[in-house]
Image (cartoon, helix red, strand yellow):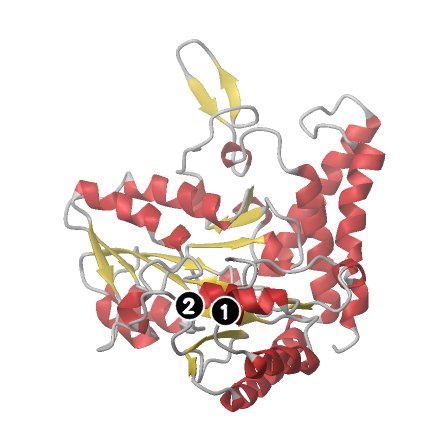
């Protein structure tokens, strides 16, 4: 695992830099970059136009990526919908489900959700739907809190199985089992954006109704996401983008929608991005998700040990197995501290990481500095970060700002 940097051109072009922001977006291996480049230099046709051998070959390549994606997540091919990212995926799901909800129905989420799994559900409140926040006595999202939040009025449970700010982990299987005991028709939706880059998600085995993820967190291109859902749900869904490819026939009086997944993939797709995603899935499969996960565990354990050496540190990710390390130095704004680290050639993220209600359970108004690691990181990267934090002196965080 320590030799994987050589596959990522970013490190060649940014010598001396440390990249610790993979929870925001992962770096791209050369095979992905080459695949995207190949599209533009060899194909560059619209997959909706199949009037030439080149276009037909391209269409087959896209179909093969869908097949590979379905195998990667153990789903059926027609259960994979390509979107622009997890945000669009969630908006497709929520728009369709909210239309079926009634007054006093309950949707269970948590204060630890990313905006993409919170803001869409908040739109249901205008219908009288109740948003229930799963929380323990400290407002923290836990597996048991989700289980206890399920009632006879629960229609939907939607949560991030892996938190992107403090690294909480929610047991998917346990929640599905509890939900099915109360009502077999409760819809369980997983924001798997932070989970799938290093851990296996078995769609069929988990018996979830939907999950969403983004390619760019998995070494793939930006602008590509996956909406995976049971066919029985997808077949009842309407597009939120109306346009080319979404219909089979149209008359002046009636629209006949195309079958799934075409119905939900309106317009010219991000062709090069989907092809690049296929290369990313092959790359991750070759390395092995379990190998990546074990590497992350080792790095997280090392980080937990070394962060204790920094004076006045406030560490919010202790006890988490995820490679998400959120911290503050007492009295320093996290975005200012991130700026200081950026000036030291260390890329991290400062703030709330789009967890807009994080103050409810962290009791912190400003958020944190988040260092997040992935397969190409090593202990030396952590050493550079810790040494930079040890060298910090008041005022250095404002260099380049004022």
> Label 2: how many residues lie within 10 Å, few (<14), some (14-19) or many (20+)?
some
Q: Is 84 above or below relative to 110?
A: above
Q: As rendered, which of 394 and 102 lies closer to the eye? A: 394
Tell me which corner region of the image, top left, top right, bottom left or bottom right, holds residue 58: top right
Residue 131: x and y, percent?
Answer: 22, 55
Q: Quadrant of the N terminus?
A: bottom right
Query: Label 2 vs label 1: CA separation?
Result: 6 Å
Tell me where residue 171 appears, x and y as whole percent.
41, 73
From the top left corner, tell me how far across and down residue 198 is, in percent.
Answer: 60, 69
- Reading the image, the residue beneath label 1 is 337
Q: Is residue 201 visible?
A: no
Q: Quadrant of residue 216?
A: bottom right
As drawn, 105 above or below 198: above
Q: Nearer the viewer, residue 222 or 151?
A: 222
Q: Is residue 197 left or right of residue 239?
A: right
Reading the image, the residue beneath label 2 is 333
Q: Would residue 89 be visible to someone looking at this image? A: yes
Residues at badges 2 and 1 in contact (C-beta under 8 Å)?
A: yes
The residue at 71%/24% (across/down) is: 49
Specify whether 200 is left or right of 330.
Answer: right
Residue 398 image point, x, y percent: 50, 64
The correct choice, above or below, for 56 with respect to 5 in the image is above
Q: Residues within 10 Å of mark 1 (few under 14, many from 20)?
A: many
The residue at the point 29 percent across, 43 percent down is 98
């Amino acid at each position: 695992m320590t030799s994987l940097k050589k596959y990522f051109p970013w490190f060649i072009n940014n010598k001396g830099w440390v990249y610790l922001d993979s929870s925001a977006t992962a770096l791209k291996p050369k095979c992905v970059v080459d695949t995207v480049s190949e599209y533009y230099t060899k194909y560059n046709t619209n997959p909706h136009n199949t009037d030439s051998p080149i276009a037909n070959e391209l269409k087959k390549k896209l179909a093969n990526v869908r097949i590979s994606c379905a195998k990667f997540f153990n789903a059926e091919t027609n259960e994979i919908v390509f979107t622009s990212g997890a945000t669009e995926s969630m908006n497709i799901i929520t728009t369709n489900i909210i239309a079926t909800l009634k007054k006093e129905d309950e949707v269970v989420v948590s204060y630890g959700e990313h905006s993409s799994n919170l803001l869409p559900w908040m739109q249901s409140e205008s219908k009288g739907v109740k948003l229930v926040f799963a929380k323990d006595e400290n407002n923290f999202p836990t597996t048991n809190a989700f289980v206890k939040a399920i009632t006879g009025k629960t229609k939907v449970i939607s949560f991030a199985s892996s938190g992107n700010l403090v690294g909480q982990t929610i047991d998917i299987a346990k929640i599905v089992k509890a939900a099915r005991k109360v009502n077999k028709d409760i819809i369980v939706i997983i924001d798997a954006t932070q989970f799938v880059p290093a851990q296996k998600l078995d769609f069929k085995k988990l018996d979830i109704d939907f999950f969403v993820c983004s390619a760019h967190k998995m070494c793939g291109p930006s602008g590509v996401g996956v909406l995976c859902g049971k066919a029985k749900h997808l077949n009842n869904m309407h597009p939120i983008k109306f346009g080319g490819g979404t219909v089979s026939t149209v008359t002046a009086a009636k629209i006949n929608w195309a079958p799934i997944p075409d119905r939900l993939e309106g317009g010219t797709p991000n062709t090069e991005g989907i092809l690049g995603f296929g290369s990313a899935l092959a790359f991750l499969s070759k390395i092995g998700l379990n190998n990546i996960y074990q590497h992350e565990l080792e790095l997280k354990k090392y980080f937990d040990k070394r962060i204790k050496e920094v004076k006045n540190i406030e560490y919010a990710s202790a006890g988490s197995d995820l490679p998400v390390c959120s911290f503050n130095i007492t009295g320093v704004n996290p975005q200012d501290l991130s700026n200081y680290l950026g000036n030291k050639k260390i890329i991290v993220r400062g703030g709330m990481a789009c967890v807009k209600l994080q103050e409810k359970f962290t009791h912190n108004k400003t958020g944190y500095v988040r260092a997040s690691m992935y397969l190409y990181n090593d202990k030396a990267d952590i050493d550079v970060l810790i040494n930079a934090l040890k060298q910090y002196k008041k005022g250095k965080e404002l260099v380049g700002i004022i």
